[in-house]
Amino acid sequence: MNTKAEKFKAYIDKVDPKAFMVDEIKDDERHSVAFRSGIEVKGQRLPFLVLIDDSIYVMLRIFVATQVVNDGNKAAIHDFINQGNKEYKVFKFYTSDNGDIVLDICLPASDDAFDPQLVDAMIRQVAYPYLNDNLTSILEKV
């Protein structure tokens, strides 16, 4: 397990040991570890993961809606998420090849400077409030 992942695991073991499933990616040259969980927003459980590897980046990825983007709603969804991308610098929306609406938050952090509490704060104080305010509007587009 990479250094940042070890720090994050130690943090969640103290705060909420059952919050994440830990998945060390085998034979990965960046020693990636995926911490998988879900976030409850407006009665919906949105899958999310914290992806930590040897790079300088830590990725928080929330699957806002899965397999919902199609030719009929793609333009409306892209217009909505592009507006969000313009307004909120800390995160970016995109649509995956599978038709998922995904929200990514990318945090730069070296091994020494990595702070697991910042990851927790980004989920609770940035992503959750935004999704709580906007999930209904997003889902209306699908």
Image (cartoon, rainbow, N blue to C red):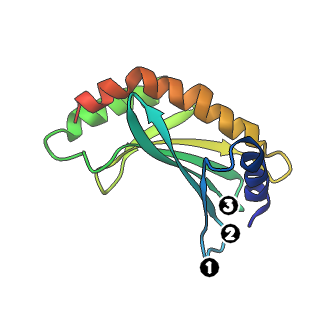
Q: Secondary structure at mark 2?
A: loop
Looking at the image, the residue that sits furthest to the right is: 112
Q: Is residue 86 visible?
A: no
Q: Nearer the viewer, residue 103 or 92?
A: 103
Measured Cα–Cα span from mark 2 to mark 3: 5 Å
- Residue 25 picture location, percent across and down: 60, 70
The residue carrying mark 2 is: 31
Residue kind at label 3, given as amino acid type:
Asp
Position above or below: 126 against 18? above
What residue is disc 3 on? Answer: 53
The quarter of the picture where residue 132 lies is: top left
Residue situated furthest left in the rendering:
72
The answer to whether residue 71 is above or below residue 118 is: below
Percent from the top left, x then y, of residue 79?
Answer: 29, 30
Residue 98 image label: none
Determine which of the numbered discs, if any, sits on residue 27 in the image.
Answer: 1
| 49 horizontally vs 93: left or right | right
Label 1 to label 2: alpha-carbon separation: 8 Å
Left or right: 132 in relation to 12: left
> Which residue is drawn at the image coordinates 42% and 40% (left, top)?
45
